Image (tube, rainbow, N blue to C red):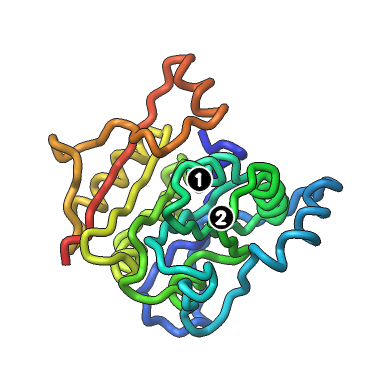
Amino acid sequence: MTTPDNKTATSAQDDTTEQPKYLRRIRSFVLREGRLTKGQQRSLELFWPTMGLEHQPQPYDFAQVFGRKADLVLEIGFGMGKSFVAMAKAAPELDFIGIEVHKPGVGACLGEAETEGVKNIRLFEHDAVEILNDSIADGSLTTIQLFFPDPWHKTRHHKRRIVQPDFVQVLRRKLKIGGVFHMATDWENYAEHMLEVMTAAEGYQNLASDNLYVPRPDNRPLTKFENRGVKLGHGVWDLMFKKTN
């Protein structure tokens, strides 16, 4: 199931990445704007000026943005941000970039970061495909994370799944050599889809010893929804693929 803490914040492309921007892309998300709580609104007003980033047509200099040079981790669709902030807090030597289209989630994440005293995150409230194509430099990312994206479980909706051949090549462009694309899902059919797409993708190597799935790494926290599912016997599949060229 797709959890409220992990909503995918991007769109999958059904053509090449060089297509004119006016052509319609197949969206992998439906933008349903929930009502902001007072706390989320307050967090947006107070903390967006220092932790928020706007879409821009040229890549950011993240060493300048963060005030230091560090390895960059980008998460697509951080949901309400609790696990995203936890990862950033646990790895202060890294800088974390989060992309989310749902404003309440962005507000919640900003508030969580402030509560936890986490300073090594910056957030976009925008479509991830546009951010990746325009605002992130090629070869700049150490890790890209995609946790519990919308599985679009009906067969007729599978084209809306974000993990598609064209999209993973966009991600490959943005990763450093040796950088890792880390995915997780609790839908077995989507895990199989991810594995099929990534196994066929040029320039990636599966980090699983059996070329299937990897155990959940310690740096990916269990969300409360995932933990509930695990207790009920639901499966979770992690995939990690390294950029080789």
User: Does label 2 or label 1 sit earlier along the sequence?
Assistant: 2
Residue 21 place in picture, x, y as percent: 50, 82
Check the image and report above or below for 168 versus 139.
above
Quadrant in the rendering for residue 42: bottom right
Residue 43 vs residue 13, the one in the foreground: 43
Disc 2 + disc 1, Cβ < 8 Å: yes
Quadrant of residue 169 in the image?
A: bottom left
Asked if residue 245 lies left or right of residue 25, the reply is left
Separation of residues labelled 2 and 1 (CA atoms): 7 Å
Residue at the image position 47 percent from the left and 58 percent from the top:
95
Residue displayed at 71% across by 48% down: 111
Q: Observer-nearest residue: 63 or 211? A: 63
Q: Which element carries disc 2, helix, strand or loop?
A: loop
Q: Is residue 151 visible?
A: no
Q: Is there any visible trace of residue 154 in the rendered image?
A: yes
Mark number for residue 150? Answer: 1
Q: Residues within 10 Å of mark 1 (few under 14, many from 20)?
A: many
| Horizontal and vertical percent position of residue 189 | 35, 36
Q: Which of the labelled discs sits on residue 29, or is there none?
A: 2
Q: Secondary structure at mark 1?
A: loop
